[in-house]
Amino acid sequence: YRSLPQKLKEAYEWGINRTNAEWFVKIDDDMIIDVKGLGKYLSPPQFEPDKPTVVGGISRKHEVLRFGKWAELNYNNSMYPPFPLGSAGHSVSRPIAEYVTANIDSL
């Protein structure tokens, strides 16, 4: 689990450099999605693929764990910024994937 953020950043980088995809979808290997339905859901007017967009279960006001198996000792803030929950899956528009790719070493 600890290497998942790096894997995701590298997957975005791969997709940006090798595809013209408008959306990037992260799901777990035990999830099933309706590809056609998701495509319709992510289409205008609800979402614009050229605008920075993250769609999915977003965790807000999540406290940084300081003890236990998932303790985070290197992050100095007491709360994480909003982030997509991995277990819920998420989609990001190309501008988000481009931003992550451009800032891969500082994120």
Image (cartoon, grey):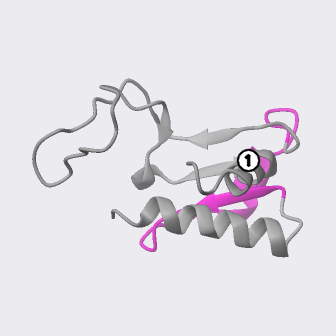
Q: Residue at x 33, y 64 (%)?
A: 1
Q: In the figure, residue 15 lies in which quadrant? A: bottom right
Horizontal arrangement in the rendering, residue 72 relative to residue 101 (left or right): left
* Residue 5 seen in this snapshot: yes
Q: Position of residue 9 (x, y in %)?
A: 59, 61
Say how many tags the image has. 1
Q: Position of residue 46 (x, y in %)?
A: 79, 33
- Secondary structure at numbered mark 1: helix
Q: In the figure, residue 72 lies in which quadrant? A: top left
Horizontal arrangement in the rendering, residue 82 relative to residue 99 (left or right): left
Residue interval drawn in magenta: 22-48
Q: Is residue 18 above or below residue 103?
A: below
Magenta span includes 106: no
* Residue 37 seen in this snapshot: no
Question: Observer-nearest residue: 75 or 47?
Answer: 75
Q: Circle 1: is it few (<14), some (14-19), or many (20+) Cα within 10 Å?
A: some
Q: Position of residue 55 (x, y in %)?
A: 63, 41
Magenta span includes 39: yes
Residue closest to the far left? 68
Q: Residue at x 47, y 30 (%)?
A: 81
Q: Residue at x 80, y 46 (%)?
A: 95
Horizontal arrangement in the rendering, residue 65 relative to residue 9 (left or right): left
Q: Position of residue 94 (x, y in %)?
A: 80, 52
Q: Is residue 69 above or below residue 63?
A: below
- Mark 1: which amino acid? Tyr
Which residue is the site of mark 1? 99
Q: Is residue 59 above or below residue 34?
A: above
Question: Observer-nearest residue: 22 or 107?
Answer: 107
